[in-house]
Amino acid sequence: MATPEHFEATIAAIATPPGPGGIGIIRISGPAALSVLQALFHPRHSATAYRSHHLSYGRVIAPQSGMVLDEALAVYMRAPHTYTREDVVELQCHGSFLVLQEILALILAEPGVRLAAPGEFTKRAFLNGRIDLTQAEAVIELLQAKSPAGAQMAAEQLAGGLLRTVTTIRDHLLGVRAIMEVAIDFPDEEVEIIAPADLRRQLTVGVREPLLELVARAGQGRLFRDGIAAVILGRPNVGKSSLLNSLLREERAIVTAVPGTTRDTIEEYFTIKGLPVRIIDTAGIRETVETVEELGIRRSRQKVADADLVLLVVDATAGLTDADRQLLASVAGKPVVLVINKCDLVAPEAVVKARVASAGLPAAAISAKTGDGIKELEAVIFTTVAGAGAWEPGHASVPNVRHEAALKAALAATDRVLAGLAAPLSPDLVAVEIQAALDHLGEIVGETTTEEMLDLIFSRFCIGK
Ligand SMILES: Nc1nc2c(ncn2[C@@H]2O[C@H](COP(=O)(O)OP(=O)(O)OP(=O)(O)O)[C@@H](O)[C@H]2O)c(=O)[nH]1
Ligand SMILES: [Mg+2]
C-alpha cells in the first residue's frame, strides 16, 4: 500500500489557518526535516539547539540573502516518537501569513522537500502504523466537528475506542475461523472439536450482537455529528421570524406586523442538548402576484424539500386554518412539529383546541414574543428527531458512514456464516464467509483498504494536517 515515495520525500506546509494570527506554525516531516531546520534557523543558544523534543528560540534567516525573516521558536522531534513517526520539525513564527509563505518558500527550495498534500501528515502517521484508519478519520472529524457532541465522539475515536471495539469483534471471528480450519484440515476426524450450536452461540454473542449495536449507534452518531436541518414554514405573519429569533436568543431576522416581511431564507445554527440544528426561516407561503415574494416562496418550498424536519407555525388566534391544512398536506412524508404560536393572545382553551386539531402530530404551544414554551418546543424537536432514549455521546464508539457500510457488510457475511453452520454447509464454504466478514472489518481499521479509498478519506483534510 505504501509506496517508497511516502517515505523519501520530506513534506512541509503551513499548519495554521490563513490570515493574521498570534502565531503561525510551519510543519515539516521526513528525513530532511533536521537539515532544513539547520539551514534556516539560527538558535540563540546553540548548545541546546536541535535537541529532540526541546523548544529553542532563534531567528529564521534566508540562506542566500542573509535576510532575517522572523523570530521563532523551533522544535525538532526525532523519529519515531512524533506525529508521523518520521523526523518532524515545527517552526512557530509570528502569525503573518505573508512571512509564513516566504519561510515556506525557502523550506521548499531545500533539496528533497515538497509541499504536503491535504492530510498528508496524518496519512503518513497511518501508513507508518502509528494510528489506524479510524483514528486518522477521527482527526478530521475533530477538526470539522460542528457540535461538542461531535467533538467528543471524535476524541473517543482518536483514543482508539472504535479500533478496540472492532478488534474485539475480529478476535472472535478469528477464534471461530481457527476452529473451522481444524475441521477443514482433519475432515475425517471423528472428534468433534466444538459443537456447531456452541459455535453459533459464540458468533451470535461475540460478533453478530456487537455488530448490530454498532450499526444502530451509527444512526444516532450521524445525527449528533452532522446535525439536522429544520425549516420554519407557515403562512405570512404567523411569527416564523419571531420563532427563529426566540430559538437563537437574538434578534437575527426582521420582524414586522406586515405580512410578507421575510423575502429570502435565513439560515443559522444552534444546538439542542448537543444536537446541532441548522434552522431556516422562510418567506410566508401564500398566493401572491408580487415577483420578489413569489421567488421567496419558491425558495421556501425548495428548503422544505431539503430539510430533515419542518416546524409548521400556526397562529393560535386563528386556529388551524384551511391554508394551514394545505401546507401540512404539502409536507406529507416529512417529520413535522406543529408550533402553535401567539399563545399569549388567546385563552388556554383555544390552545387546547389547536392541539387537538393537530391530530397526533408532535406539537408545542408557544409565544415567540414572551419566550413561553420555547423549552418545551426544543424538547419536542429533540424527541421527534432523536427518539426518546437518552443519548450520551462519548461513552461508546460511534461509527461514521464509511464504517457503517463496512459493518453492515460484515453483518451480512456473519449471517451467512450462521446460516452455513446451521445448514450445515461444508466447513470450507463457511470459512469463505468468515473471511469476507474479516475483510470488511479490516476495511474499517485500514488493513484491507484500497489506495482510492485512502485518497478519498485524506482528501477531506486541510493542508498542514
Ligand atoms: N403577541 C404576539 N405577537 C407575535 C408573536 N410572534 C410574532 N408576533 C408578531 O407577529 C407579527 C409577525 O411576526 P413575524 O415573526 O415577522 O412573522 P413571520 O411569520 O416571519 O411573517 P412573514 O415573514 O411576513 O411571513 C409581528 O408583529 C410580531 O411581533 C407572539 O408569540 N405573540
Ligand atoms: Mg418572517
Image (cartoon, rainbow, N blue to C red):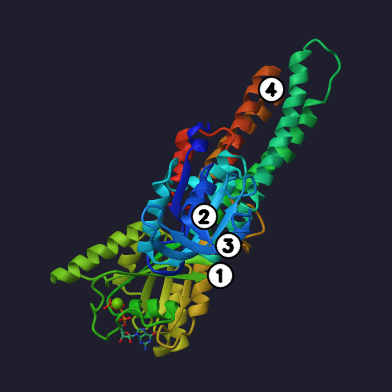
Instruction: Answer with left or right where residue 28 lies relative to residue 444.
Output: left
Disc sitting over residue 184 in the figure: none
Of label 2 and label 1, which has the lower sequence position?
A: 2
The reply to whether callout 4 and callout 1 are in contact (CB within 8 Å) is no
Mark 3 → mark 1, Cα distance in angstroms: 44 Å
- Near mark 3 (Cα within 10 A), the count class, few <14, some 14-19 or many ≥20, is many
115 shown above or below 231 = above
Q: Which residue is mark 4?
A: 423
Q: Which residue lies most toward the right here?
A: 191
Mark 2 → mark 4, Cα distance in angstroms: 43 Å
Of label 4 and label 1, which has the lower sequence position?
A: 1
The reply to whether callout 2 and callout 4 are in contact (CB within 8 Å) is no
Disc sitting over residue 141 in the figure: 2
Query: Which residue is drawn at the image coordinates 48% and 49% (left, top)?
Result: 36
Amino acid at dot 3: Ser
Spot occupied by residue 26 in the image (x, y as percentages of width and height)? 47, 56
Mark in front: 2 vs 4? 2
Query: Which residue is drawn at the image coordinates 42% and 74% (left, top)?
Result: 339
Pick the front one: 42 or 430:
42
Q: Which residue is mark 3?
A: 56
Mark in front: 4 vs 3? 3
